[in-house]
Amino acid sequence: MVRKKASKPSVSRKKADRGTGGRKKNVLITGVTGTLGSRLAEALYYDKNIGIVFGAALGSKPYYFNQFDTKRFVYKNLNILRSRDLTNLFLSSDFKEANVDTVVHLAFFNRVSRGKGKDSHDLNVAGTLNLLDKCIESGTVKKFIFKSSDVVYKIRPHNPIYLDENADLNFDPKVDPWIKDRVDSDMICQSKMDARGVNIVILRFSNIIGRMVSSQLNAYFDSPLVFRAMGFNPLINLIHMEDVVASIQAAIHKNVKGIFNIAGADTAPISTFAEINRSRMHSLPTPLLGPVNTVMRTLGLTKYYYSVDADRLRYSVLLDTRKAEKLLGFKPRSHVYFEGGGSA
Amino acid sequence: MDQKNRKRARTLTRLLAPEEYRRFQEIKINDLGFGYDPFGLEMESAMAAFALAKQVYKYWFRVESFGVEHVPQDGPVMITPNHSGAIPIDAVMLGVDLAIKMQKPRLMRAVVDNFAGFLPFINTFFYRCGQIIGARRNFEELLKQGEMVVVFPEGDKGTGKPYKDRYKPIPFNVGFMELSLLHRTPVVPAAVIGAEEQYPLMFNMKPLAKLLNFPYFPVTPLVLLFGPLGALPLPTKYSIYYGEALHFYRDYPPETVNAPEIIKKLVRTVQDRVEDLIARGLKNRKGVFGFSGFPFKGLRGQPEKKDLPRHERKQLQSQAGSGSAAD
């Protein structure tokens, strides 16, 4: 189990002010009720360079948004799969008056759930397409930020040690639908990169670690007993939620477009993190990892799905973040803190 | 590395003399915060591997080397030796030699063939000891970091050469020269004598190699005769020769990479230097095992004259004419 460690925002205010053009940004966040969404909404609410924050998600307004002043934070119940809902939002008077110029798309089905394959595909792929089309049509939205991840990259042992933004994506037809959705949505955003009037920013994050975060590695380290492929001990990078929020803030403020790799401050072999987390780690021959994982899931001992990205337990994936450093001015500052053990 | 393995690694480092231990500790790595560099190098593992390899270096192959002063003490450098011996032990001996003999200790980073990345244990072992899988960008990254990189321009075909082709380097690949010009890196030609005979390769079992995803599967007479015991390399005497550093980048700008003919010519220059060093090494050595008078034909210190490339045969003939022929 992991939780955040107190840290400073990684993009200084001075740096963030540069590129804002002196005008406050008004931001729509989809999936605002998620862990990342609510953290981002809070960060933007207290950001002096942000005017109004529109939070959109499916369902009624959660209690934790009641602390925010309704003049600066507006919550909307929105189903991005329904075109009518989106049209209504974009045509609504408060949306128009707020002059929303930036959309951060976080509404994504992150948990690996076999029973809801169709639902998650609809939300992840069709939802992204609907929202992006609507933003381009609107004429008022100037920036669309999409949260992607490093699972879109093809993992091979002979990959360069640092994967840059042009590295091969995983177009393998046999790839798990969970990854396929991510590659598809990433590609949808890439295909519209040249849309007039809208700067599309794709942020590809390394493994996000934090309390209540739905990520594969979070689930992996939450298990009391973890297994790795015998004879392999790949390097992994973990990024703290604070850094994820800070990088999105940087993308909002900077006048940029394109794809950016975002990685965290902690890089080490998977066994080192397991040791810090005090997980009981054992090596198993690769063919046994799948069946053992299935048994563990059946017994409720883990929420990690080995079959989704099995290669990740064998080969290193590190991101080349030089572009983000140069153009976004982003450098990770927060270290992951493991409740079971200590700070990374 | 977990605590248990760390303790084991520290135990192994006791094999090193205090001076060697201190020298190794002087080597700095690009630590990402947990004792690992981006390529997975970890000094404790590297030291443990070095401690073991040092024993093989000293007692099994009895390595001697010449001209290590030609290897630059700082900055990026490429060392380009011949490659042979079925299993790349020549790379290990080269790494140990450089760590021991250089005035300022430097860690050798060798570029390993892609297939090693798929192999469990071996893949992790290579990474922890500082070796890298051969993606071009990895190579470039190391040069940018000012590392000393050993590249075998013959590639894996070099190690898979049959015994009859020993000391006949196959044409060098050109990639290293392009990177040398692009990153203004000196090239140090080198020759490893002794590795070619450690596993007298009879033939390559291609179907098995294909099945295991290996570039080749060597079969030696010793394996056929002695079974698993025959997998031990013969205790040939190694000698390593380093040539003078070649600074091609001083005369050729990076744009030269767009002129394949010039690149080929420069690569040929490096290969000629390596072949000269091989000829020198063969001439100087007393025998495959370090002493003369070994009874078996073909396992003597030098390959038969008819097996040598034409320019070497000419060289040997001229040396014979002047009364200085080897053996």
Image (cartoon, rainbow, N blue to C red):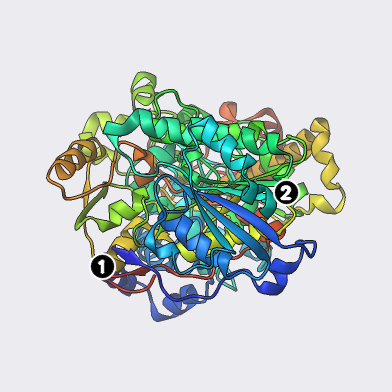
Q: Looking at numbered disc 2 in the image, what kind of residue is underneath it? A: Ser
Q: Residue furthest left?
A: A299
Q: Looking at numbered disc 1 in the image, what kind of residue is underneath it? A: Arg
Q: Nearer the viewer, residue A283 or A221?
A: A221
When asked about the image quadrant of residue B21, the answer is bottom left
Percent x, y for residue B64?
50, 59
Q: Is residue B233 left or right of residue B27?
A: left
Q: Residue at x 26, y 67 (%)?
A: B8
Q: Is residue A76 left or right of residue B244?
A: left
**Which residue matches tag 2?**
B180
Q: Nearer the viewer, residue B302 or B41?
A: B41
| Tag shown at residue B8 | 1
Secondary structure beneath disc 1? helix
Secondary structure beneath disc 2? helix
Chain ID, mark 1: B
Percent x, y for residue B90?
47, 48
Q: Is residue B80 above or below residue A40?
A: above
Quarter of the figure that contains the N terminus of chain A: bottom left
Who comes first in sequence, dot 1 or dot 2? 1
When asked about the image quadrant of residue A86, the answer is top right
